[in-house]
Amino acid sequence: MPNIHINMLAIIIAVVANFILGFIWYTPLFGKVWGKEMGFDMTKKPPASAMIKGMIFMVLGNFLMAWVFAHNMAVWNPVTWGLAPSPMSPMANAFMAAVFTWLGFFFPTDLGTVAWEMKSWKLFFINTGYHLVSLVIVALILANMN
């Protein structure tokens, strides 16, 4: 029987870090290009209610992603099953978990936005880059705090 331990403090730190990353990624780094590619009128500021709703949804989404990702990382850890530890370092395992999760789940979904929603490749690279960096940061936090 697996012994899954999830560090809730690590989840909370990952949520905060991911929220900060999202702000930096979609505001000073790529905000103007992202908004233009999304078709937003960049001369108008969204209403406060839309911003609050977006932030609440982002925190909720960040929490769910970090919590589920922590479970996935734990399940694939041999120690969870009472086996010898992996020969790779915990940081290397975390990085690989992030890359393979991104490659299998986020990258194909992001490709779908180009194929089916007619979004630009520029938008694809902004969004899929965020998803990869986000997963790596969360994975490293989770691995470092377990």
Image: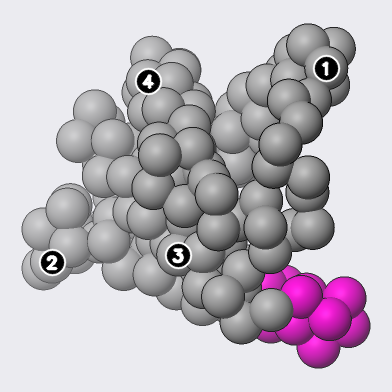
Q: Which residue is mark 2?
A: 88
Which numbered dot is residue 73? none
Label 2 with label 3: CB-CB less than 8 Å: no
For image coordinates 51% across by 64% down, the residue present is: 126
Report how far apart the C-alphas of labels 3 and 1 lie in the structure: 27 Å
Q: Amino acid at mark 2?
A: Met
Q: Looking at this view, is 7 or 100 the one in front?
A: 100
Instruction: Tell me if residue 91 can be seen.
Output: yes
What secondary structure is the magenta-colored segment mainly?
Answer: helix
Disc 3 secondary structure class: helix
Q: Which residue is mark 1?
A: 47
Q: Which residue is mark 4?
A: 13
Q: Amino acid at mark 3?
A: Gly
**x and y percentages locating residue 132 in the rendered image:** 43, 62
Which numbered dot is residue 129? 3
Report the residue that reaches farthest toward the right: 116
Q: Amino acid at mark 4?
A: Ile
Q: Looking at this view, is 144 or 56 the one in front?
A: 56
Report how far apart the C-alphas of labels 2 and 3 lie in the structure: 25 Å
